Image: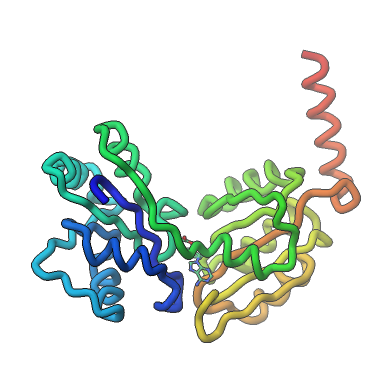
Amino acid sequence: PPGLTLVATPIGNARDITLRALDVLSSADVLAAEDTRSLRKLLEIHGISLGGRPVLAYHEHNGAKMRPQILAAMAEGKSVAYASEAGTPMISDPGFDLARAATEAGHPVTSAPGAAAVVTALTLAGLPTDRFLFAGFLPNQQSARRRTLEELAGVPATLVFYESPRRLAAMLRDAEAALGAERQGAVARELTKKFEEVRRGSLGELAEFYENSAARGEVVVLIDRGRLENVSGSDVTRALEEALQTMSV
Ligand code: SAM
């Protein structure tokens, strides 16, 4: 298709890519990727040859510089396919500014949807999926991380976070402090890969487990919705104070 197609790629298992995504990658005039090496490898696995087509790098650090070039190709009538390093572009990955710029320039923007770790984790975690809040990566700094978790404490939806294995135990401790040790959660690790694993338990149990055995690979953390019965005393007090403040305005 003309314009820009946002192409989802696998999050682990190389065969988790749709037939349409492969069609788009086979036929696009220009390929752009967050990581050109992983895209080339994926094309190779699926027997798609480049046939002289360029593969442009487009990532966080060169987006501003590359956008005009990619937009110019679309203006010439070329079709562009963009893939982030893994999974769905724009889901904790680049692509947003490119898609917005393409839309603003009047080019058609479409997607070839596919894998995303957030949805895969939700399907396996055993927590309600009727409502969820995707919070991506928490801030690096601990105080900011706790503040964000406290903001989310009362949200009546399953919370989903991306996390690095290195920070997992610390993040679970922060979540325990902000949401209470009894709040249920799950850690989904290495989804679609050989060592896929889902561990369920209270935040206290999960924090203790990962403090004692470092997680490897990629992880998604899911936390059960806020319910009055599992909100800790101080949270209730804070919520009441906030409510009273709002009322007195
Ligand atoms: N765009 C991707 C998507 O659609 O899910 C997410 C990219 S983000 C930079 C990478 C994070 O996604 C990882 O740190 C991890 O939290 C999560 N993730 C990606 N692949 C995963 C997998 N196979 N298993 C568990 N988590 C994964």
Q: Is residue 77 left or right of residue 170?
A: left
**As drawn, is 63 to the left or to the right of 89?**
left
Q: Position of residue 103 (x, y in %)?
A: 31, 36
Residue at far left of view:
52
**Residue with the most extreme top position:** 249
How many numbered dots are placed on residues in this image? Answer: 0
How far across and down, in percent of the image, does residue 204 sit?
77, 67
**Which quarter of the figure has residue 222?**
bottom right
Asked which quadrant contains residue 174, the reply is bottom right
The image shows residue 143 at horizontal and vertical percentages of 60, 48
Work out whether residue 65 can be spotted.
no
Classify 138 as above or below 201. Answer: above
In-image side of 172 versus 55 (left or right): right
Q: Is residue 20 visible?
A: yes
Q: Nearer the viewer, residue 190 or 216?
A: 190
Q: Check the picture and name the quadrant holding the C terminus.
A: top right
Q: Nearer the viewer, residue 219 or 28?
A: 28
Residue 176 x/y as whole percent? 74, 59
Q: Residue at x 67, y 51 (%)?
A: 132
Residue for point 27% across, 60% down: 33
* Residue drawn at the location 16% of the way across and 57% of the way down: 29
Location of residue 238 with respect to 82 vertically, above or below: above
Q: Residue at x 40, y 77 (%)?
A: 14
> How are the colours assigned in the image?
rainbow
